[in-house]
Amino acid sequence: MQNRSRGYAGAVRVEIGPDAVKVRLALWQKVLGLMRDMIVPLRDIEGAEVVEDATGVAMRAGIKVGLRIPSLYYAARTLRLDEAFIVRRGTPAVSISIGGEGHLRRALLSTSEASELAARIEAARAGSPGS
């Protein structure tokens, strides 16, 4: 059974499965943000925590490609492709720290359920073999 969480306005869908966390983006986020859905194996997730000022973090992260409306909304990645942002002003976010062999090191996703989502990811990590 998968745990699902909808991000702001239902545009982002996060699915927590037995082996991976899947971040499903809306079509407009994929096109304007120059991104695709993200699938992160639980064994590669190093942690999940709540970030209250997600747009501030995105603004300080350096040059980004994708949709950027400074101080309001980001659907973008850093040029090095090591951080992904789907964040909106005034909405907390869950920050997922990622290890492993891929380029992505962090995904920051705004959702009104950030605390619950971070707790569910941490619980899935604890129950995952190899964590």
Image: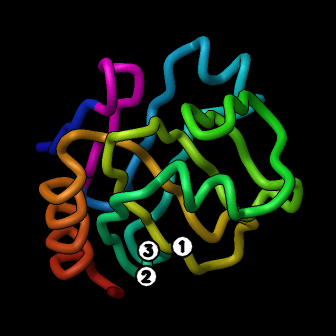
Counting residues from the N terminus, which is met first, the one under dot 3 or under dot 1? 3
**Marks 2 and 1 close (CB-CB < 8 Å):** yes
According to the picture, the residue beneath numbered tag 3 turns out to be: 45
Q: How many angstroms separate mark 3 from mark 1 (CA)?
A: 5 Å
According to the picture, the residue beneath numbered tag 1 turns out to be: 98
What's the residue type where badge 2 is placed?
A: Glu
Local SS, label 3: strand
Counting residues from the N terminus, which is met first, the one under dot 2 or under dot 1? 2
Q: Where are the magenta residues, as a range?
A: 7-17
What's the residue type where badge 1 is placed?
A: Ile
Residue at the outermost front position: 71
Question: Residue 46, labelled with which disc?
Answer: 2
Local SS, label 1: strand
Does residue 64 appear to the left or right of 17 in the view shown?
A: right
Q: Position of residue 17 (x, y in %)?
A: 26, 51
**Marks 2 and 3 close (CB-CB < 8 Å):** yes
